[in-house]
């Protein structure tokens, strides 16, 4: 399934459960969607860094399995952005469901 | 866990080609960060594949497949990170450069030196005109514009150092427009339409080059790009 444009909000959602590095974020999105949301992992990092530039997430070097990795954390602005994007998504999906008659 | 030697061989065989294709044209600072994170991602995928019972080579192939086509990744990288040209433009404004570069001082100050040279030529051209009446009119304004522009450009590196990269770029572009505008209008005194056209082309070229940089300059990348290395 094509998730064009939805990757940033999915990243914020995954990070709302705790700090994670890029690989863990990619795996969690795939697992939680039970494989429906399959995306090219190479596109994850530009999306992560774009969120970081906007100040929605922050990154830090951490020790993980004996290796130094860059982990990401949701900021206060990121929590607010996630909340507003969640409510926008609910409205949008509700409206589309109404039209398609699936509710 | 795979032994380090085998890991390095797999990285060289599978990941290096992907990275070369995906990061072509990226600024060194952006490349370093992308390379580190993608390499970590690849190794984690490799470990997971081996843990699932795949042969190391198959696990490496699966990890690369997961990253997707290098061309598509390159497009997203170039949208998000500074390219070499953009980083060079920022450096020429910020006054930072490589300490190993023997022409570093000149390269770092090329914009300031050029701006002062252009304003000096503008003043000389205006003063050497046969009619002294001209100096009382528009030409005096043009001299002021070009000199003020040159002066403003010399403040741009300071603004960069204070961490306000976007403001510094904006001031740099506006100041250069003043310098070049003053110069062009003085040189082609008889043909103001030509001067206006040339200045418009210069401004459009600047806008095309600078707007993507402006978009990319978040707090993190701005610091990376202007760090003296």
Image (cartoon, coloured by chain):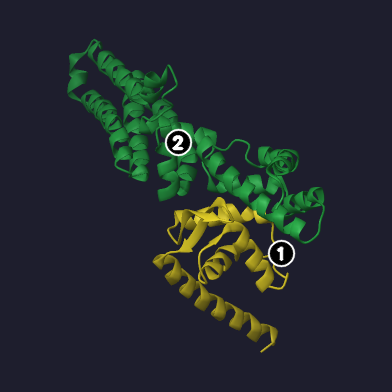
Chain colours: A yellow, B green
The residue at the point 58 percent across, 45 percent down is: B36
Tag 1 subunit: A
Indicate the position of residue A68 as horizontal and vertical percent values.
Answer: 54, 50
Left or right side of B18 for B81: left
Asked if the residue at tag 1 contacts the one at tag 2, i.e. Cβ–Cβ closer than 8 Å, the answer is no
Element assignment for label 2: helix
Q: Is residue B106 above or below residue B169?
A: above
Tag 2 subunit: B
Point out which mark residue B206 bears: 2
Left or right side of B124 for A21: right
Q: Are marks 2 and 1 on the same chain?
A: no
Indicate the position of residue B141 as horizontal and vertical percent values.
Answer: 23, 28
Q: Is residue A65 above or below residue B157?
A: below
The residue at the point 43 percent across, 31 percent down is: B229
The residue at the point 66 percent across, 41 percent down is: B19
Left or right side of B43 for B192: left
- Which of the 4 image quarters holds residue A37? bottom right
The residue at the point 25 percent across, 10 percent down is: B128
Q: Is residue B55 above or below residue B157?
A: below
Comparing B223 with B229, the one in front is B229
Comparing A4 with B144, the one in front is A4
Mark pair 2, 1: CA separation: 39 Å
- Which of the 4 image quarters holds residue B95? top left
Element assignment for label 1: loop
Q: Residues within 10 Å of mark 2 (few under 14, many from 20)?
A: some
Q: Say which residue label 1 marks.
A: A38
Left or right side of B13 for B226: left
Indicate the position of residue A14 as horizontal and vertical percent values.
Answer: 56, 69
Indicate the position of residue A87 as horizontal and vertical percent values.
Answer: 50, 78
- Which of the 4 image quarters holds residue B227? top left
């Amino acid at each position: 399934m094509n998730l064009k444009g939805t990757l940033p909000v999915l990243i914020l959602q995954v990070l709302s459960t705790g700090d994670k590095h890029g690989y863990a974020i990619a795996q969690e999105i795939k697992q939680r969607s039970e494989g429906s949301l399959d995306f090219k992992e190479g596109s994850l990092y530009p999306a992560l860094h774009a969120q970081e530039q906007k100040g929605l997430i922050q990154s830090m070097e951490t020790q993980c399995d004996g290796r130094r990795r860059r982990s990401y954390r949701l900021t206060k602005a990121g929590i607010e952005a996630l909340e507003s994007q969640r409510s926008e998504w609910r409205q949008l999906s509700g409206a589309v469901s109404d039209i398609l008659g699936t509710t | 866990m795979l032994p380090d030697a085998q890991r390095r061989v797999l990285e060289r065989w599978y990941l290096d080609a992907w990275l070369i294709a995906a990061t072509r044209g990226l600024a060194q600072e952006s490349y370093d960060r992308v390379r580190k994170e993608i390499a970590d991602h690849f190794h984690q995928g490799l470990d997971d594949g081996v843990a699932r019972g795949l042969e190391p080579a198959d696990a490496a192939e699966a990890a690369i497949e997961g990253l997707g086509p290098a061309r598509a990744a390159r497009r997203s990288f170039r949208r998000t990170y500074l390219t070499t040209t953009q980083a060079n433009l920022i450096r020429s404004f910020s006054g930072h450069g490589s300490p190993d570069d023997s022409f570093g001082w000149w390269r770092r100050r090329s914009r300031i030196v050029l701006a002062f040279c252009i304003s000096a030529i503008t003043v000389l051209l205006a003063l050497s005109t046969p009619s002294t009446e001209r100096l009382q009119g528009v030409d005096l304004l043009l001299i002021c514009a070009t000199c003020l522009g040159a002066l403003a450009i010399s403040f741009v590196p300071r603004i960069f150092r204070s961490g306000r990269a976007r403001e510094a770029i904006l001031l740099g572009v506006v100041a250069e427009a003043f310098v070049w505008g003053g110069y062009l209008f003085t040189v082609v005194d008889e043909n103001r339409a030509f001067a206006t056209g040339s200045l418009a082309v210069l401004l459009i070229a600047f806008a095309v080059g600078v707007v993507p940089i402006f978009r990319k300059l978040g707090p993190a990348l701005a610091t990376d790009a202007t760090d003296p290395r």
